[in-house]
Image: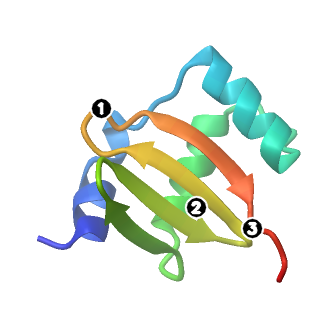
Amino acid sequence: MDDDKILRLNLDKIHTTKMGIDRIERNLGLDTKDVVEWCKNKIKLSDCSIIKQGKNYYVTIDNCVITINSYSYTIITAHKLKNK
């Protein structure tokens, strides 16, 4: 099964820590009540790119990258892409 399908089938398992919430909000400049739900909604979009490298999934969408541990489904961080 493709990595993107596996991640999308396990959306209900995706979570993060309090520190993760703070880091994601700060890195992306988000003002939302539910960071995890925001990330899940990005993963659901058909035009996002999902790749698995080593132990992590990397979801690229809307000029940002969301990093998710592929074993625990913990959102580790998210950051904006740097313009080249």
- Checking the image for residue 81, the label placed there is 3
Task: Determine the residue positioned at 30% across, 47% down.
Answer: 55
Secondary structure type for disc 3:
loop
Q: Position of residue 8 (x, y in %)?
A: 32, 59
Q: Position of residue 34 (x, y in %)?
A: 67, 33
- Closer mark to the observer between disc 1 and disc 3: 3
Q: Amino acid at mark 2?
A: Lys
Give the mark, 1 or 3, whose residue is nearer the N terminus. 1
Number of other residues with Cα within 10 Å of mark 1, as a class: few under 14, some 14 to 19, many 20 or more: few
Which one is in front, 62 or 40?
Answer: 62
Task: Determine the residue positioned at 84% across, 77% down.
Answer: 83
Task: Report which residue position mark 1 lands on.
Answer: 72
**Colour scheme employed for the rendering of this structure:** rainbow
Picture layout, residue 82 above or below residue 65: below
In the rendered image, which quarter is residue 57 located in? Answer: bottom left
Q: Position of residue 7 (x, y in %)?
A: 30, 56
Secondary structure type for disc 2:
helix
Question: Separation of disc 1 and disc 2 at Cα?
Answer: 19 Å
Quadrant assignment for the C terminus: bottom right
Is residue 32 at all visible to an observer of this figure? no
- Checking the image for residue 42, the label placed there is 2
Is residue 19 at all visible to an observer of this figure? yes
Give the mark, 1 or 2, whose residue is nearer the N terminus. 2
Picture layout, residue 2 above or below residue 12: below
Q: Are marks 1 and 2 in contact (CB under 8 Å)?
A: no
Quick one: which residue is furthest to the top in this view? 18
How many numbered marks are there? 3
Give the mark, 3 or 2, whose residue is nearer the N terminus. 2
Question: Separation of disc 1 and disc 3 at Cα?
Answer: 24 Å
